[in-house]
Amino acid sequence: MPTFSRPTPSWLADAVLYQIYPQSFADSDGDGIGDFAGITERLDHLEWLGVNTVWLNPCFASPFRDAGYDVSDYLSVAPRYGTADDLAALVEAAKGRGIRVMLDLVAGHTSDQHAWFRRAADHPDDHRYIWAEPGDGAPLPDRFVPSPGTRPGGYLPNFFDSQPALNFGYARTDPAEPWRQPVDAEGPRANRAALREIMDHWLRLGLAGFRVDMAHSLVKDDHDLAETSKLWTELRRWLDAAHPEAALLAEWGDPAVSVPAGFHSDFLLQFGGPSDGLPLRSLWNNGHGTVADHWTQRHCYFDAEGGGTAGTFVTAWESLNAVTSDCGFITLPTANHDFSRLACGPRTAEQLPAAFAFHLTWPTLPAIYYGDEIGMRYIPDLDDHEGSVLGPRYNRAGSRTPMQWDTSANAGFSTAPHDRLYLPIDPASDRPTVAEQRADEGSLLHLVRRLIALRKSTPELGSHTTVDVLHTGYPLVYTRGGRYLVVINPRRDAAEFVLSSPSIAPGRRVEGEGVRVEDGRVAAEGFGWGIFAL
């Protein structure tokens, strides 16, 4: 396992992350698209909620064929969000509230509108991207896209065709395929240097770090990801020396590989790792919203019918934690811009408290997707927008709709006419809003706030304290730090469990509803949950 010059930044262990999809959070100028100034105006909500780290989906210049994940200039912000000064003002205002701001770094590809690519398309001596030039009328290799310029041959995309892959080399070269350059060739070296320059530019302006998009995708034909891992280890050592307080989070989905490689944390995702994202999906994926055709999972644990098991997640987490616990963290999201919200399909508002109780008491870094704290719903059947549709049942737009602030027009997101909004507002008359839930102390929003405060004030409920899992069926039962008992029953039917150890003697209930612990027996009502001091 690689060793690094500095440990994980101390602040990260106590981070409660909040993901903001900037074009859908708050629109300050009435053009229908969220912006930096809108986020700044809503920082009071985040401070009140108790989150202390925000990460923004990409906000760099882009033609937005993939919602900003197609970057045309890494050192400029997209005009739709405002100016660099507006971003600086957001970072400064957030800092005054004890909130760090992280950016999303698209490391493996650019837009085909980037100046680098426009040059490469006309210059055969440019190796910033991966180009194949078969010659003699031979067809392009699989997945390569015909050149849009005077350069013969074609390029390798990293996702959509409009996202040409940056050349970080191949783990395995082949003289018969000269586009397979080694990782130490001129083009790969230039791209590694460019990553350092981009990161350095934004970190010097006060940003707290990066979430790295598709972090596993850089070196090609890297089946064991050894060369990609070496690349990130190199960057981490530079980061330790140049910006020791900056954090590097991975969109990789396999913390057992990414964290030893140099990331401070990795997100559990709906894909990635040995089981292609099953640990996360086994918790939240109920077969509605964003669903890939190849997923075979039938039941998730947080389902009213109670057909799942927490064992799938727990077993995977235990294996991952054995690798990461000494060198970084695992991040558990409620949802994200690519994956269904918690409130999706048949999952109703009464099921969400148990989900958040688990999310905020498990020893991972919690990441709350904007709006999940009020139970915003995944909206089905929206039109394809900025590349949102990935398959017949995989439409990401439903997780990207505007934040619901109040009961005014457009739910307080924007003063623009409704037909100019980035995406439609949830049309339901009972859509949840921040204002209504702030006024109701029994709301999900108040509960999430209390759970965040409890986590922050109780080291035993944090990211690096031990967990002892007593039962992975219904209810899920575990202790934290030997001092707290947590009971989670996400199904509709009641559930019971007998505590076998006499040393587990719950005292006062710290938080919860619908759970009793008496004479060594745990009795949980449907959708009940509880946190008890021992």
Image (tube, rainbow, N blue to C red):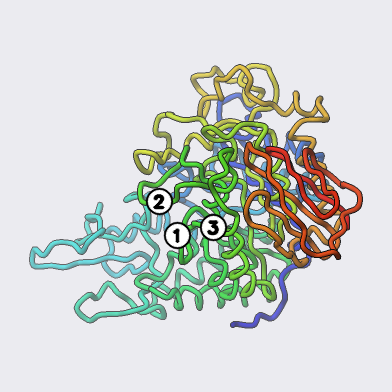
Looking at the image, which is closer to me, 339 or 188? Answer: 339
For label 1, the residue is 276
The residue at 66%/50% (across/down) is 367
- Decide: marks 1, 3 in contact (CB < 8 A)? no
Q: Nearer the viewer, residue 380 or 189?
A: 380
Give the mark, 2 or 1, whose residue is nearer the N terminus: 1
Quadrant in which the C terminus appears: bottom right
User: Which residue is labeled 3 in the image?
Assistant: 279
Secondary structure beneath disc 1? loop
Answer left or right for 221 relative to 13.
Answer: left
Q: How many marks?
A: 3
Compared with 312, 191 (above or below) is: below
* Residue picked out by circle 2: 295
Q: Position of residue 161 (x, y in %)?
A: 32, 51
Left or right: where 68 falls relative to 387: right
Amino acid at circle 3:
Pro
At label 1, the amino acid type is Asp
Residues at discs 2 and 1 in contact (Cβ within 8 Å): yes
Left or right, 508 with reference to 231: right
Q: Nearer the viewer, residue 382 or 205?
A: 382
